[in-house]
Amino acid sequence: MKIYKYIVTFHLIFLRFFTCINTTYVQVSQPIEIIYPKCFHAREKTGIMVHKEYLNPVHGYAVTPFKSPNEDRNYFHPRDVNEKIKIIVLHFTAIDFRNTVKKFTSKRNKTTRIVSSHYVIAKPTEASTNNQLLQVVPENCVSYHAGISSWGNYLSINPISIGIEIVNRGYNVINDSWNPFYQDQIRIAGLMVARMVKQYKVLPQHVVGHSDIAPNRKIDPGVLFPWGQLYKNYGIGAWLDNDEMNETVIIAKYRPSTPCPRTPDRKLFINYLGIYGYNIRYETQAIKAFKAHFTANQKPKLYNQKITRLEMYWIWALVAKYSNLSKSEL
Ligand SMILES: [Zn+2]
């Protein structure tokens, strides 16, 4: 009996000790300049503190809440209970990690454009594996990453979405080229989005790029963002399987309400784009956004507004495969 008592006491002391260590460990915040020495100047005083955080299923860092009177430096507000997460938006930053984080946590003044994002994924040249992923805004809060945008019936995206920014220069106007993403960045994005899709029950066609939801204003994450690879390796987003590149298979599997269009038809294509989710008020930009995501993905030379039989097939098949899922949600 006595031995049992000792064991229980020892166990309780040990548990308390462990919890205490654990709590202390979580709360240790350090200046961002120390944690990201490749990005910030050693003597730079940004006032941004970060701490280690397990960002399921990836280990990374999180921006520590700012203290008064700077508490509004990382722009967010609590997510309303009715605002369920329905959409995940992928972005490229077009600027480096340092400037991205500074922009997302800059002090407010009258001219500041309020912008932020839940996550930033640094390049492997900017960070090591344990701090490549930085959380700026917690998922249970709303960040301001989408701007004026829409997807299907959703006209206000920020309150119902999570934004992930991937550090990448994007499009280079001077030599008409796109910057590739690092595999390390894609792996982190894939793991994070796969967990979010499961946790928040996000529909495949609701994992989108910024250009999908704001085609008139945005081109990110761009034509080199590997949507097909994310679908194949992590099971996320909307895509067609190899066997689904066959009309008979689509008809057998999804019973589409309309037959596959025989010839390219801009009007019909735009109509399908609208059914799928795009804002078709900006026709040309919506076509380009679709092509960047699907038929011209990884093929910058095809990134234009031309509609061929390939585009007709893809939109017809995607609508057949996914639009019923949207309806069942409404
Ligand atoms: Zn964006």
Image (tube, grey):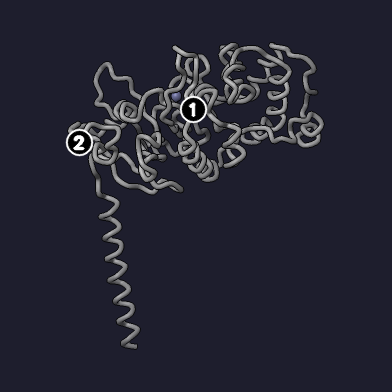
Residue nearer the viewer, 106 or 185: 185
The quadrant in which residue 229 appears is top right
Badge 2 density bin: few <14, some 14–19, many ≥20, Cα 10 Å? few
Question: What is the quadrant of the N terminus in the image?
Answer: bottom left
The quadrant in which residue 287 appears is top right
Q: Amino acid at mark 1?
A: Pro
Badge 1 density bin: few <14, some 14–19, many ≥20, Cα 10 Å? some
Question: What is the quadrant of the C terminus in the image?
Answer: top right
Residue nearer the viewer, 262 or 200: 262
Outermost residue, bottom side: 1
Residue 190 position, x and y percent, is 52, 40
Tell which circle, 2 or 1, labels the residue nearer the N-terminal end. Answer: 2
Residue 68 circle label = 2
Q: In screen coordinates, is 42 left or right of 59? A: left
Residue nearer the viewer, 189 or 6: 189
Residue 81 circle label = none
Residue placed at 68% from the left, 23% from the top? Answer: 315
Ligand 1 image position (quadrant): top left
Q: Is residue 26 above or below residue 3?
A: above
- The residue identified by callout 1 is 180
Q: Secondary structure at mark 1?
A: loop
Distance of label 2 from label 1 (alpha carbons): 40 Å
Residue placed at 79% from the left, 29% from the top? Answer: 247
Residue 127 position, x and y percent, is 35, 38
Residue 22 position, x and y percent, is 30, 58
Residue placed at 59% from the left, 41% from the top? Answer: 233
Q: Secondary structure at mark 2?
A: loop
Q: Is residue 239 above or below residue 20?
A: above
